[in-house]
Image (tube, rainbow, N blue to C red):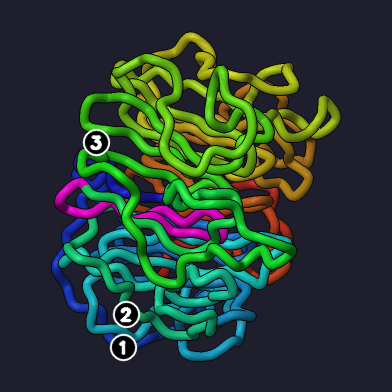
Amino acid sequence: MTRPSFFAAALLALACVERGEVLSSARERGDDGAQAGAGGETTRPEPELVISGVAVGMSHSAAVSSGHLFTWGANESGELGLGDTNERHVPTELTSTQTFVSVTAGGDVTAGGDYTCALDDLGGVYCFGANDRGQLGQGDRQARSAPVRVPLPVAARVVSNNFEHVCALLADASLYCWGQNFEGELGQDDSPPLGQDMTTDDALTPVQVPGNDWSDVSAGDGFTCGVRFDGTLWCWGRNTGHELGPDTNGQIRHPIQVGVDSDWARVDSGQHFSFALKQDHSLWCWGLNVGSPSDGYPLGMDTSGLDRPTRFGSASDWIAFDTRVFHTCAVNRKNELWCWGRNIEGQLGTGDIDLRSNATHVADGIAAVAVSWFTTCALTTAGHVLCTGQNEHGETGDGTTERPLRFTDVTPAAP
């Protein structure tokens, strides 16, 4: 999941991104986009696009550059936004008149499929793909294979949609969420759904979360976390593993403060846990540590879980991070990429499938990172996109369905 934040301007400047170009007609680079080099290895032509954002869903990926939006991987629910349900094994450009500036991808292995949301330069949010929980915000549960605009009262500046609900931070610092609400993840302080119908309280269009002073938001699996202007951290929704922090027990369907600190800057929520960045660039985590010693821990610590934000390591130089279910990756000021957790599909990019219970240095020259269940994509400081891990549906974008064990450059060619 990628989204603008307090360090986004620095990253985009570092990547030398130019915005404002109108998205041109769709163009898919076929298998002939890869050429055989000396010694028989596969090489790609020098890309002309500079990628400014990357996102990974359950089985698909997306990237945005200078207004152009590219998607690839599985497409059963239309999550690629290409007007059909055919999967793509290389980055494929959408046909659109929008100038996109960021993209985020969501989905759940137990749900109806993946979906994608993108933000344009005017603050419009466009979503496409699965819609079984109303995550496209259209007032129904019908999947869409092409982008549809989500009705919001003012322009958005941050969008997050890790699992089956979406949240958008608007230009007036208000926060709106929509989609699944079984655990109270929409923050409405409502009653739990009655009976066995898990969809009873889903919001098929955006609803406002209390407060008009939000500076960041992250949609997790069944819960949501956000940061306010005063630097305080708040979460709401499911709470089976202290996802909502210390001294809490059970589901809480309205925002509550996590701890007492007031120096938080950014938050990213996964399946049962969260990571958050403080203003001094230290990284903290809490919640249920999914997995076991044989799987590797996504919290990067040998513990079953943490009931309160706990500092990750001693470094205070982190600038970007992302987490989802089984692994986590983070980037420091040296633009080094560090990853840890499960590696059964090669999603850590270490060249093997061995778990890493502790943070492992896996790449250099990285500006941002996006992770999914079993796939990781990274944005380089030169504006290239690299992917590794699960590739059953072409989600790494290298033109094959073979699993790479190291990061492979899949930057799309200019249209």
Q: Nearer the viewer, mark 1 or mark 2?
A: 1
Residue 344 as seen in the image, left or right of residue 271: right
Q: Earlier in the sequence, mark 1 or mark 2?
A: 1
Query: Residue visible at 50% across and 43% down?
Result: 253
Please provide the residue range marked out in magenta: 160-173
Q: Secondary structure at mark 2?
A: loop
Asked whether the beta carbons under mark 1 and mark 2 sit within 8 Å of each other, the answer is: yes
Identify the residue position indicated by label 1 in the image.
Answer: 25
Q: Earlier in the sequence, mark 3 or mark 1?
A: 3
Identify the residue position indicated by label 2 in the image.
Answer: 415
Q: Nearer the viewer, mark 3 or mark 1?
A: 3
Say whether residue 88 is visible: yes
Above or below, comparing residue 160 to residue 37 in the picture: above
Query: Residue visible at 66% across and 63% down?
Result: 198
Which residue type carries mark 3? Answer: Phe
Estimate the x, y position of residue 171 in percent, counting from the top left.
Answer: 16, 53
Estimate the x, y position of residue 79 in percent, counting from the top left.
Answer: 53, 75
Is 169 colored magenta in this rendering?
A: yes
